[in-house]
Amino acid sequence: MEQRFTFNQIAGAYRASRPDYPKALVDDVVSYASLKPGDPVLEVGCGTGQATKSFAARDLQIVAIDPGGEMVRTARESLAGFDNVELAETTFEAWPQDRGPFRLIIAAQSWH
């Protein structure tokens, strides 16, 4: 199994054990990128949605992709209250890039 699919098998446990990102860190990224509510953001490797939630709470339009079906399912549960998040099960390489432009591309833990 490829390393990028490892956490897919334990998505629920991964979500339960991962801490949220510090609010100040997300605020710094939003400020540095001069993002405003409604700006489009692409998240590569959203996992269970920890970072996604932090950016979605700032009213950004998020397209979040992840290759793991269980990760995406778990992210859907975590992000159920956000109508500004679109989730897709795909790798970055296979994602049809007919969208955009994006004001920001984030990858919180996916590009090690």
Image (spheres, helix red, strand yellow):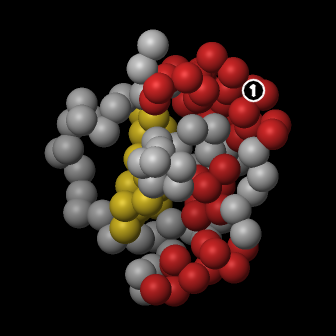
Q: Position of residue 91 (x, y in %)?
A: 34, 32
Q: Which residue is at the far right?
A: 16
Q: Is residue 61 left or right of residue 91?
A: right
Residue at (58% x, 53% y) in the render: 52
Q: Which residue is at the far top?
A: 1
Q: Which part of the image, by quadrant, shows the N terminus?
A: top left
Whether residue 68 is visible: yes
Q: Is residue 97 left or right of residue 11?
A: left
Residue 46, compared with residue 55, is above or below; it is above
Q: Which amino acid does the dot numbered 1 rest on?
A: Gly
Q: Position of residue 102 (x, y in %)?
A: 30, 64
Q: Position of residue 82 (x, y in %)?
A: 63, 51
Residue at (78% x, 52% y) in the render: 19
Q: Is residue 60 left or right of residue 22?
A: left
Tell which of 103 and 15 is nearer to you. Answer: 15
Crowdedness near tag 1: few (<14), some (14–19) or many (≥20) residues, C-alpha within 10 Å: some
To which residue does mark 1 refer?
A: 12
Tell me the quarter of the picture where residue 58 sits: bottom right
Tell which of 66 and 35 is nearer to you. Answer: 66
Disc 1 element: helix
Whether residue 36 is visible: no
Residue at (58% x, 64% y) in the render: 55
Residue at (46% x, 48% y) in the render: 112
Tell which of 21 and 36 is nearer to you. Answer: 21
Q: Position of residue 4 (x, y in %)?
A: 46, 29
